[in-house]
Amino acid sequence: MLRSLKLADIVTLFNSLCGLLAVIVIQDGFTYLAPILILAAAVADGVDGYLSRLFSGSELGANLDSLADIVSFGLAPAAILYSFAGESAGYLLFTALSFYFFCGMLRLARFNTSHQGLPSFRGLPITAGGIILSAYVLAGENYFNSYLAILLAFVIGLLMISRFTYMKARKPEIVTPVALVFGITILSYAVNLSYTHLMASLLLGIMLLYVISPAIKKAV
């Protein structure tokens, strides 16, 4: 089986490793390292997609990618957000995050059965959902509100299983600046958390624009 793995699959495994490490380190009190790992997983998710298109993926590729995504962008962000909420976490937040997680599973199952190869996504990608929850945590405690987190989890969950159409961001003029924001946010963790909070807020804003992009496209 190992011989059948291609370069894109190795990157996918790195994606899943980041998700696993995020779940582990959040339990050890590394509050902001955990969501940074989710952003790293998102970068890996983009890279493995590019590599699979460039060199053609393996037979395992699509299923492996979905398994990695449910760990890194479904389970891990939910665990991070619940842990970050601390004493303010309750049954409502647990219910909202469970809903988010189940919707993510349904979104990936739908993608695997009917959406591969299409020019756009039907429903918000789970990767985007995981980035949003992680960026919300990275924005810092000053912006965190458990009720807002509950609303965010429910809304993202609904959008993932919705019929809204989301573009696949592959054009260099879109990918390059967004990748730059990702890179600076991740690297800023090693420099100064204040910069991380600032860049995460910017990233959150970009991702929220993506969330409402179907409405913007329809209005235009």
Image (cartoon, helix red, strand yellow):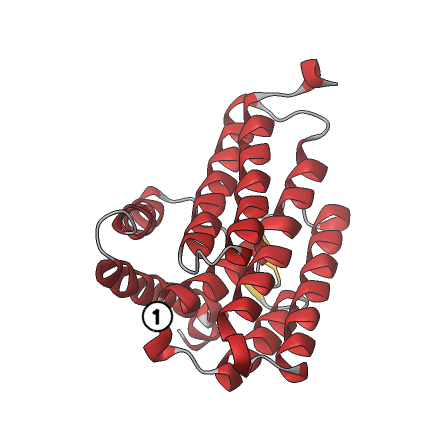
Which quadrant does the C terminus fall into? bottom left
* Three-letter amino acid code of the residue under disc 1: Gly
Measuring 33% from the left and 46% from the top, which residue is drawn there?
A: 179
**Horizontal and vertical percent for residue 15?**
54, 40
Given residues 124 and 74, the one toward you in this image is 74
In the image, residue 45 lies at what x, y percent? 52, 42
Decide: few, some or many residues near mark 1? Use Cα within 10 Å; few <14, some 14-19, many ≥20. some
Tag 1's secondary structure?
A: loop
Residue lying farthest to the front in this orientation: 28
Image position, residue 3 (x, y; %):
68, 13
Side of 203 relative to 73 (left or right): left
Tell me the quarter of the picture where residue 206 sits: bottom left
Residue at x-position 22% and y-position 55%: 192
Q: Which residue corresponds to the image point at 44% horizontal and 56% vertical from the top-left? A: 30
Q: Of 62 and 43, which appears nearest the observer?
A: 43
Circle 1 residue: 140
Percent coordinates x, y for residue 136 in the rendering = 42, 69
- Quadrant for residue 5, please give it: top right
193 sits to left or right of 157: left
Residue 162 visible at all: no
Q: Residue furthest top?
A: 3
| Residue drawn at 63 percent across, 82 percent down | 90
Circle count: 1
Q: Is residue 18 above or below residue 166?
A: above
Of the 4 image quadrants, the one containing the N terminus is top right
* Residue 192 relative to residue 41: left or right: left
In-front residue for pair 79/206:
79
